[in-house]
Image (spheres, coloured by chain):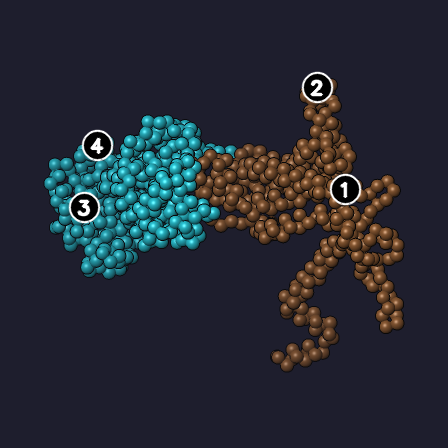
Amino acid sequence: MAKLKLDHVTKRYDDQGEVVTAVDDMNLDIDHGEFICFVGPSGCGKSTTMETIAGLTIPTEGTVHIGDRDVTNLPPKDRGIAMVFQNIALFPHMDVYDNISFGLRLRDYPQDEIDRRVERAADIVQLEGMLGRMPEEMSGGQRQRVAIARAIVREPDVFLMDEPLANLDAKLKVHMRTELQRLHKELDTTIIYVTHDQEEAMTLSDRIAVLNSGSLQQIDPPLTCYNEPDNLFVAGFIGSPSMNFVEGTVEADAIETKNFSLDFDPSSAEGIGVGDSVTIGVRPEDIYPGELREEVADASALIEARTDILEPMGDEIFAYMLLGKGETSMSQEQATNDQLLMSIDPDSDIEEDEDIQVVVDRAKVHLFDTESGEAITHTLAPAWNSDGVAESEAESDD
Amino acid sequence: MATATDNESESRGPLARWTQSAIQNPERVYRALFYVAMAFFLVTTLFPFYWLLVLAVTPSGRLLAGSFLPSINLFGVSTTFPLPVPKGFNPQAFITVFEQVPFHLYMLNSFALAVTTTVIVIVVASLAGYVFGRLRFPGRVFLMLGILAISYFPPAAFVIPLFQAFAGNAPITLPFTDVPLFTPPRLLNTPGSMVLPFSALFMPLSIFILTTFYGQIPDGLEDAARVEGTTRLGALFRVIMPLSAPGVATAAVLTFISVYNEYFFSSIMATSPEAARWSPIVGGILSYQTQYTTQYNLMAAASIVGVLPVVILVIVAQERIVSGLTSGALKE
């Protein structure tokens, strides 16, 4: 049983006299057989964390345990891990068979055992009949599969995948994604997967670890990250298009923003009082045109808006709306406060540059502390109205 | 417009017209320059060989009599032919070289010294090249500069202290004191006294070549090898070196040729030009010169025989050397 445990792992680099903290006090507990995705923007430390687990980097502080062993100072070869690299990293001077069997040959496995395992790995990733080819004669997807075969052939305790699909085209990416899921089912090993693509993370993983500037923001199942983000960063990072954020202030019975107000009882949530500045977070799919107000279980008051840009996606339309009588504001900060993105039914009758009224589903409104970014509550609906919440969830599912 | 240009070009002299066409078609000029440079290069490099061949096949009795430039009678006008030709034909010299002196043993000496030095240089320079090319550490540039500086030292500067040390007569002392450190073994007349200085002298060039090559191998490949089960050293010898084959071949061939041709150190470290004392090819060639005679034809024949292995090596390794010296880039 290969559990993986990172304990207060910190990695600092000395960049020409300037200390850069790539990973900041990371604590992770990963169970055997879990599929964990590390997501985050570029430079958030996810690859460094991965390298720390692989042993390619030694952490400045903290320990790494794989199974019951402390592997913090072990070289990569003694950690029982296998890795798939972003740039695939097949050895160009070896054919597919030699690439896949490289690790086995180094460990002096008997020849028939090597043959058996290579064949099985090639079978799993559907590379039969290509064992004699050189990497340069293969397509990107085939090379990727060789890299995966090279990793699985050693039957490692932990699989590390560092953006393995980043260099593939969109169609192949989706195909390889399902193959990876099948692989995970078949192998039953722990997989740690680094990606900056939150869609990949949502579809693949048992749990998502969201990283930002070197520290762990949240590690939870995908839907928990989506529905109950711990802070502003997670809320904005998970979900595409991302959540609408509007800054506001808590009043006695409402949250006032520049352009609208939402009914709210401050006593229904903990750690919040009148006068606090908060950030409201609403996902595009929780905003509805005013005429659907009756169908939304816990609708807010009507909000005046003006449509700006429409993006028909086929199964839905993304409608960018300007608040505050459509004055186009230039500064970034104002833009977030004056803009709402709504996702609506593709059959909706909606035009660009049209004055409309919208409502938000109060049961799905997130509140964050503007200062710290921490989540305060994930619904504005009072707790006793939980029936209504369930109902509105069912309705908004369409 | 077109007629105006025509008139203009007609009104110019031939030189002006040639200049004009050279500017419009620079490829032709480049090509011509290429041939000129190539011809010059070929003549200067190949003529000495031709001259050696002429000397080698000329019978020894006729070497010093008369001119190598034959006079020819051209339509009643007597003139000298500008290219030297052999005065007679005596291929026997190529056999005599082995009869008078055990020249094959001298060749073997040079060959053994060159191979040993090359192996040492490639192994050590690979380690240095790996460190300089792939690791970042404080003082890296400084160390590189140090190696560069040492490579500019004249080898003669090392000869006297090294000779003294390799003689093994007196202990090495701390500089400026009489405190003895250790007494080195007597290495004179052994391969050790030559391989050691050769390795040190030819190391910097190989380090620079290998640093460039090893530095270009993508990090991912080394990481992959290490995750797959090699150590850093294992990754160097199993992945980085095979992928840098052109660079390794270049460094090896350059080192081999340099040592094979070396005379300065070996003539001093071998106290007399005897094959048993590890004297190299040049020592053998000079053995055809005695106090009273100099057998130029045998020396020439021996030179040709001695140079053959290098010619073969270069022809075989040429493609790799050229690609190694010029490109050096490796795509992942």
In the image, what residue type sits under mark 4?
Glu
For marks 1 and 2, give the CA distance.
Answer: 43 Å
In the displayed structure image, the side of residue B205 where residue A318 appears, left or right:
left
Q: Which residue is labeled 2 in the image?
A: B180
In the rendered structure, the residue with mark 1 lies on which chain? B
Q: Earlier in the sequence, mark 1 or mark 2?
A: 1
Q: Percent x, y for residue A18?
A: 49, 34
Query: Between A369 and B194, which is closer to the camera in this rendering?
Result: B194
* Chain on which label 3 sits: A
* Residue type, mark 2 in image: Pro
Q: Is residue B104 visible?
A: yes
Identified at 75% across, 31% down, the residue is B160
Q: Which chain is cyan?
A: A
> Judging from the image, what secondary structure is the residue with disc 2 in?
strand
Q: Colour of chain B?
A: brown
Furthest-bottom residue in this view: B3
Of residue B160 and residue A230, the one placed in the foreground of this image is B160
Please name the amino acid that badge 3 sits on. Asp
Do pointers 1 and 2 mark residues of a single chain?
yes
Question: Label 4 crowding class (10 Å Cα cut-off): few <14, some 14-19, many 20+?
Answer: few
Marks 4 and 3 on same chain: yes
Which one is in front in this view, the residue at disc 3 or the one at disc 1?
1
Disc 1: which residue: B101
> Which residue: 63% across, 40% down?
B115
